[in-house]
Image (cartoon, helix red, strand yellow):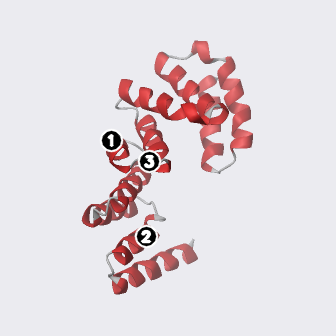
Amino acid sequence: FAQAYIGLLRSHNALLDLAQGSRFLSKAVEFRDRLPARDQLYVDAWVAELNTPGEALEKWRQMASLYPDYFQASANTGYKLLARNRYTEGMPYALQAASRQYELSGLSSDLVGRFALAQEKYSDAEEAYRIALSAGASTSAVRLSNTFAAQRRFDDANAAYDQAYRTYKKA
Protein backbone atom coordinates (compact mmCIF):
# COMPACT_ATOMS: atom_id res chain seq x y z
CA PHE A 1 0.00 0.00 0.00
CA ALA A 2 2.94 2.34 0.54
CA GLN A 3 3.42 2.59 -3.24
CA ALA A 4 -0.21 3.58 -3.70
CA TYR A 5 0.08 6.24 -1.01
CA ILE A 6 3.18 7.63 -2.71
CA GLY A 7 1.22 7.75 -5.97
CA LEU A 8 -1.52 9.72 -4.26
CA LEU A 9 1.06 12.09 -2.80
CA ARG A 10 2.53 12.68 -6.27
CA SER A 11 -0.93 13.29 -7.69
CA HIS A 12 -1.68 15.91 -5.07
CA ASN A 13 1.74 17.47 -5.62
CA ALA A 14 0.96 17.79 -9.34
CA LEU A 15 -2.27 19.55 -8.37
CA LEU A 16 -0.32 21.88 -6.06
CA ASP A 17 -2.20 20.45 -3.09
CA LEU A 18 0.52 19.22 -0.77
CA ALA A 19 -1.71 19.75 2.26
CA GLN A 20 -3.81 16.80 1.12
CA GLY A 21 -0.76 14.98 -0.21
CA SER A 22 0.94 15.07 3.17
CA ARG A 23 -1.82 12.86 4.57
CA PHE A 24 -0.83 10.16 2.11
CA LEU A 25 2.86 10.63 2.85
CA SER A 26 2.13 9.94 6.51
CA LYS A 27 0.46 6.69 5.52
CA ALA A 28 3.40 5.75 3.28
CA VAL A 29 5.77 6.36 6.19
CA GLU A 30 3.80 3.82 8.24
CA PHE A 31 4.63 1.16 5.63
CA ARG A 32 8.14 2.41 4.79
CA ASP A 33 9.92 -0.68 6.14
CA ARG A 34 8.03 -2.89 3.69
CA LEU A 35 9.42 -1.01 0.69
CA PRO A 36 12.57 -1.76 -1.31
CA ALA A 37 15.60 0.41 -0.44
CA ARG A 38 15.12 2.79 -3.40
CA ASP A 39 11.50 3.46 -2.48
CA GLN A 40 12.46 3.99 1.16
CA LEU A 41 14.82 6.74 0.00
CA TYR A 42 12.00 8.21 -2.06
CA VAL A 43 9.76 8.35 1.00
CA ASP A 44 12.61 9.89 3.02
CA ALA A 45 13.15 12.56 0.37
CA TRP A 46 9.46 13.46 0.41
CA VAL A 47 9.45 13.60 4.21
CA ALA A 48 12.34 16.06 4.00
CA GLU A 49 10.56 17.97 1.22
CA LEU A 50 7.55 18.59 3.46
CA ASN A 51 9.04 18.67 6.95
CA THR A 52 12.65 19.88 6.61
CA PRO A 53 12.92 21.50 3.15
CA GLY A 54 16.52 22.57 3.75
CA GLU A 55 17.53 18.91 3.79
CA ALA A 56 15.50 17.84 0.76
CA LEU A 57 18.12 18.72 -1.87
CA GLU A 58 20.66 16.35 -0.36
CA LYS A 59 18.07 13.56 -0.10
CA TRP A 60 17.15 13.95 -3.78
CA ARG A 61 20.81 14.24 -4.79
CA GLN A 62 21.71 11.10 -2.85
CA MET A 63 18.90 9.20 -4.52
CA ALA A 64 19.85 10.49 -8.00
CA SER A 65 23.44 9.42 -7.39
CA LEU A 66 22.53 5.94 -6.18
CA TYR A 67 19.81 5.38 -8.80
CA PRO A 68 20.67 7.38 -11.94
CA ASP A 69 17.91 5.63 -13.89
CA TYR A 70 15.27 6.76 -11.38
CA PHE A 71 14.46 9.93 -13.24
CA GLN A 72 12.14 11.43 -10.61
CA ALA A 73 15.10 11.86 -8.28
CA SER A 74 17.17 13.58 -10.97
CA ALA A 75 14.27 15.87 -11.89
CA ASN A 76 13.60 16.80 -8.27
CA THR A 77 17.31 17.47 -7.70
CA GLY A 78 17.26 19.72 -10.75
CA TYR A 79 14.23 21.66 -9.53
CA LYS A 80 15.80 22.17 -6.11
CA LEU A 81 18.99 23.50 -7.73
CA LEU A 82 16.98 25.75 -10.07
CA ALA A 83 15.27 27.27 -7.04
CA ARG A 84 18.71 28.04 -5.63
CA ASN A 85 19.95 29.59 -8.92
CA ARG A 86 22.62 26.88 -9.23
CA TYR A 87 22.24 26.51 -12.97
CA THR A 88 25.53 24.89 -13.96
CA GLU A 89 25.24 22.37 -11.14
CA GLY A 90 21.63 21.57 -11.95
CA MET A 91 21.96 21.02 -15.69
CA PRO A 92 23.31 17.43 -15.52
CA TYR A 93 20.35 16.38 -13.37
CA ALA A 94 17.89 17.98 -15.77
CA LEU A 95 19.58 16.31 -18.73
CA GLN A 96 19.41 12.94 -16.98
CA ALA A 97 15.71 13.40 -16.27
CA ALA A 98 15.03 14.48 -19.87
CA SER A 99 15.58 10.89 -20.98
CA ARG A 100 12.90 9.62 -23.36
CA GLN A 101 12.55 6.68 -20.97
CA TYR A 102 11.00 8.97 -18.35
CA GLU A 103 7.26 9.52 -18.66
CA LEU A 104 7.70 13.18 -17.70
CA SER A 105 10.62 13.83 -20.04
CA GLY A 106 8.80 16.82 -21.56
CA LEU A 107 8.77 18.61 -18.22
CA SER A 108 12.42 17.75 -17.73
CA SER A 109 13.26 19.10 -21.19
CA ASP A 110 11.57 22.30 -20.09
CA LEU A 111 13.85 22.27 -17.04
CA VAL A 112 16.86 21.87 -19.34
CA GLY A 113 15.65 24.92 -21.23
CA ARG A 114 15.34 26.93 -18.05
CA PHE A 115 18.90 26.10 -17.02
CA ALA A 116 20.18 26.92 -20.52
CA LEU A 117 18.28 30.21 -20.68
CA ALA A 118 19.60 31.25 -17.28
CA GLN A 119 23.12 30.65 -18.59
CA GLU A 120 22.36 32.58 -21.81
CA LYS A 121 22.80 29.45 -23.91
CA TYR A 122 19.98 30.47 -26.18
CA SER A 123 20.24 27.82 -28.89
CA ASP A 124 20.29 25.10 -26.23
CA ALA A 125 17.26 26.67 -24.55
CA GLU A 126 15.36 26.88 -27.85
CA GLU A 127 16.10 23.24 -28.63
CA ALA A 128 15.06 22.10 -25.16
CA TYR A 129 11.81 24.05 -25.27
CA ARG A 130 10.98 22.67 -28.71
CA ILE A 131 11.55 19.13 -27.44
CA ALA A 132 9.40 19.91 -24.40
CA LEU A 133 6.64 21.28 -26.59
CA SER A 134 6.70 18.22 -28.82
CA ALA A 135 6.35 16.09 -25.68
CA GLY A 136 3.30 18.06 -24.56
CA ALA A 137 4.79 20.54 -22.07
CA SER A 138 2.66 23.47 -23.23
CA THR A 139 4.10 25.96 -20.72
CA SER A 140 7.35 25.79 -22.68
CA ALA A 141 5.79 27.98 -25.36
CA VAL A 142 5.93 31.02 -23.11
CA ARG A 143 9.49 30.18 -22.10
CA LEU A 144 10.43 29.85 -25.76
CA SER A 145 8.98 33.33 -26.27
CA ASN A 146 11.11 34.57 -23.37
CA THR A 147 14.18 33.02 -24.97
CA PHE A 148 13.55 34.94 -28.18
CA ALA A 149 12.94 38.15 -26.23
CA ALA A 150 16.21 37.71 -24.32
CA GLN A 151 17.95 37.68 -27.71
CA ARG A 152 16.00 40.77 -28.79
CA ARG A 153 14.22 38.70 -31.45
CA PHE A 154 10.93 40.37 -30.70
CA ASP A 155 9.05 39.26 -33.82
CA ASP A 156 9.84 35.63 -32.97
CA ALA A 157 8.98 36.28 -29.33
CA ASN A 158 5.59 37.72 -30.25
CA ALA A 159 4.84 34.85 -32.63
CA ALA A 160 5.75 32.25 -29.99
CA TYR A 161 3.69 34.07 -27.38
CA ASP A 162 0.70 34.30 -29.72
CA GLN A 163 0.99 30.57 -30.38
CA ALA A 164 1.10 29.92 -26.63
CA TYR A 165 -1.98 32.08 -26.13
CA ARG A 166 -3.89 30.20 -28.85
CA THR A 167 -2.89 26.88 -27.30
CA TYR A 168 -4.05 27.93 -23.83
CA LYS A 169 -7.27 29.38 -25.19
CA LYS A 170 -8.15 26.03 -26.82
CA ALA A 171 -7.51 24.17 -23.58
Residue 100 visible in the picture: no
| Label 2: element kind | helix
| Label 3: element kind | loop
- 88 w.r.t. 171: above or below: above
Q: Position of residue 156 (x, y in %)?
A: 34, 82
Q: Amino acid at mark 2?
A: Ala
In the visual, does 105 lie left or right of 40?
A: left
Quarter in which the C terminus is drawn: bottom right
Residue assigned mark 3: 104
Residue situated in front as seen by the camera: 64 or 89: 89
Q: Which mark is residue 141?
A: 2
Q: Position of residue 147 (x, y in %)?
A: 36, 70
Q: Position of residue 64 (x, y in %)?
A: 40, 31
Q: Which mark is residue 7?
A: none
| Label 1: element kind | helix
Label 3 or label 2, whichever comes before in sequence order: 3
Between the C-alphas of marks 3 and 2, the distance is 17 Å
- 171 w.r.t. 134: above or below: below
Residue at left 57%, top 24%?
44
Q: Amino acid at mark 1?
A: Gln
Residue at left 62%, top 29%?
47
Between the C-alphas of marks 2 and 1, the distance is 22 Å
Q: Amino acid at mark 3?
A: Leu
Q: Position of residue 73 (x, y in %)?
A: 45, 35
Alpha-carbon neighbours of circle 3 within 10 Å: few (<14), some, or many (≥20)? some
Q: Which mark is residue 96?
A: 1
Residue at left 50%, top 16%?
36
Q: Nearer the viewer, mark 3 or mark 2?
A: 2
Alpha-carbon neighbours of circle 1 within 10 Å: few (<14), some, or many (≥20)? many
Between the C-alphas of marks 3 and 1, the distance is 12 Å
- 127 w.r.t. 60: above or below: below
